[in-house]
Amino acid sequence: MAKKLVIVESPAKAKTIEKFLGRDFEVRASMGHIVDLPKKGLGVNTRKDFAPKYEVIEKKDKLIDELKAASKRADEVFLAPDPDREGEFIAWSLQNVLGLKNPHRAVFNEITKHAVQDAIKKPRQINEDLFNAQQARRVLDRLVGYKISPLLWRRIQSGTSAGRVQSVALRLICDRESEIQAFVPEEYWSITATLSKQKSSERFEASLISRLADLSAVNSADQEAEANVGSNNEGNGSKASKKGRIKISSQEEADTILAELKGAAYNVLKYEEREQRRQAPFPYTTSTLQQDASSRLYFKPKRTMSLAQQLYEGIELGERGQQGLITYMRTDSTRISDEAQKMVKGFVAQEYGKEYVGAGRMSKAKATTQDAHEAIRPTDVTILPQSIKSFLTPDQFKLYNLIWNRFVASFMAAAIFDTVRVDIGAKQYVFRATGSNLRFPGFYAVWPREEDEKLLPRMQVDETLDLHKLKPEQHFTQPPPRFTEASLIKQLEEEGIGRPSTYVPIISTIQDRGYVEQEQRRFMPTWLGATVNEVMNKHFPEIVDTGFTAEMERKLDDVEEGRRSWIEFLRTFYGDFKSTMEKAEAEMDRVQKPVEELDEKCPDCGRNLVIRTGRFGRFISCSGFPECRYGRSFVNKTGALCPLCGGDLVERKTKQRKRLFYGCNNYPTCNFAIWEKPIPETCPNCNGLMVIPKVGQDPVCYNEVIVPRRSADEEPSPDGTTKKVTKAKGSTRKKATSEAPKAETKRKTTTTRKKSTASTTRKATTTTKRASSRSSATTSKATKKVVASPSKRNVAE
């Protein structure tokens, strides 16, 4: 019997599909793209309708010969790459390179038996509009990158590049950094009262919000904010308005208010109970999955998409066989098929009860939403994460569990809270306390809550309360936070920049080029990145303009929908771009790399040493270069001293992932290394090392706060390489292999230092005091102690 040939991109996808189609089908993999624009040369004829010149990718000739032979043996050929622009381009490439006449295009959104067989029964032709949209994007990106990058090589340094979307992402990061550098913190104070009902031991806190005369203005502003707020992804409340609220700008003002409150009676002005409904979250799109996987699982977007690809293409599930577990993972839609809706609602009703079934959270498609695919969901909601855990890797399980929970939660009822708000008068001031109690969990039955319940006792208007404490506290306004991978993706999506398939390459490119680096998981521009951004802003303002880039994306969508010619789209763009290029080539001056002079002489010739920036970062060299060739690597000192040997703690980076950590400059003699940023100040309690756990948090004592909650296998290796932590004698820790510490679970960091056990405190304090004396004998003992027993290393450090 004649065979039918099905061609997909990957062997894993081929293996899964082959089991669904039977003996009449042969399934082969193209191993991704088979053609691309040439590595050398523009590869686009700008004079002849931007005709691209595609070349067969290196080392694909043998594979193409095999696919040609297989296609000649078959009566019918089905091209089944992924159901998006890129997949359509691969299908078109296969048709042309293999010389296929009228091949079938099979499209499915999930790799299940029903979906695959249905796609084979109902194939279509290759969608020229979809292909043209991908081709236009590829040519557009090549024109921008190929034309601008050589200009940057000549003016800045070799290896630099520009891209239509990467340059916008870099600008977002640089603009945020400029905001942070220009930010001037403002001091403000809060006053909190600890109260209770009379003759009650149950205490609660209330915050000073306004003067009594301004309370009506505060209430009006709050009501207006609640009426205008749009439901966000989690369906949560509104941000409080500042109208009418008291502002305390200094300690003097705080002291004045405290003096005025002396001897005041605290009476209940208003006690309000009401019901609040919190809506379920939307199912995942590519962007929201990457954001949540980053914040909840500490997965990088690239890792998230790799795992999602594996779950989509199929996993061997024992008796169930090979099966795709999730729908296609590149989507910007929250739409769910009618069949999947019916299945999940039935599942929720059976497992949790009919009262838990919700209508389903699916947002209306935005103007930028392609909506060709469903949201990311399990292909079969009855395949519970725990039931297949043994067939998945730990990371596959975490991601599948996240997707499954989110999908089920999105079709569950709203959570219902009983909320309480109490306004309390004290002379001419008003304090407010709020509380909530979860009455009906709704979607929280499967989706984790991020806040704790705060209960308040029932009170009556005019009731007098007992005051136990008034606490003034100093604060400073904070600059906008630097972007994390999750928040950068969110910003790109909100600006309409890029599409689901482009977020990961954008972030990877600006990191690989050395334009940004991460400190505590947040992006900071390097000198090179800031310089490239400055040049692009000056000479190519449209290319780095968010509005212009978003408009390009909308026009590409028009091409996909058949509303615009891809050639006319490129012709319009290139006419303006060519003029901009000519002007830039004439005006752009060579950028001088800055040097920072050090108060240190060159040991070879006596001239001053300077800090320079090169291809691989900052380094120290002689100001007399090139006559004098002296140079050494640059280390950035933190100003803090090593608690083990008294050496300087300096910035270092892991060798594989380039993650920032801090280690002793006396390595390898001293092995001390930590993730948290150390500061020069010492702990007022134990004279130990003070660190900043996360960006924006207050410093804490390393001995009292960090050490008790961390094991040695969560610390960086002092040489920045992969390390193995073996089980020491008397230690219960398991073996672990990792380049860096395992991602710690979310934890709240408080400025109030936790008290460690008496023995731990004594050991930590003793070790710190010994280290500060810089005694060589003590250093030796401390080092031996760490090496001999990793389980005690935290205490010593």
Image (tube, rainbow, N blue to C red):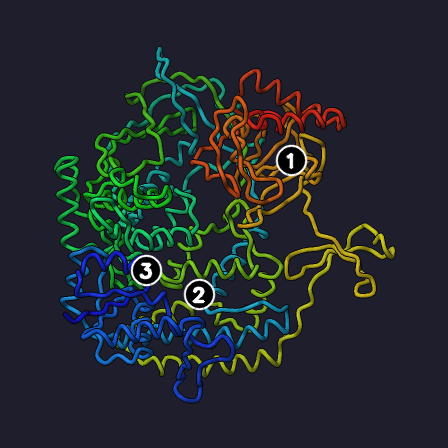
Residue lying at the far right in this picture: please name it: 606
Task: Provide residue 322's location: percent of width, then percent of height.
Answer: 24, 51
Q: Quick check: 767 above or below 96? A: above
670 or 545, nearer to the observer: 670
Q: Is residue 720 visible?
A: yes
Q: Which mark is residue 11?
A: 3
Amino acid under disc 1? Asn
For marks 1 and 3, the one nearer the N-term is 3
Amino acid under disc 2? Thr
Which residue is located at x 22 percent, y 72 percent?
A: 77
In this view, the mark in front (2 or 3): 3
Q: Which mark is residue 641?
A: none
Q: Secondary structure at mark 3?
A: helix
Which image quadrant for residue 630?
bottom right
Which image quadrant for residue 554?
bottom left
Q: Which mark is residue 671?
A: 1
Q: Which mark is residue 546?
A: 2
Give me the C-alpha separation between circle 1 and circle 2.
Answer: 46 Å
Task: Provide residue 700's location: percent of width, then percent of height.
Answer: 57, 31
Which residue is located at x 45 percent, y 17 percent?
A: 468
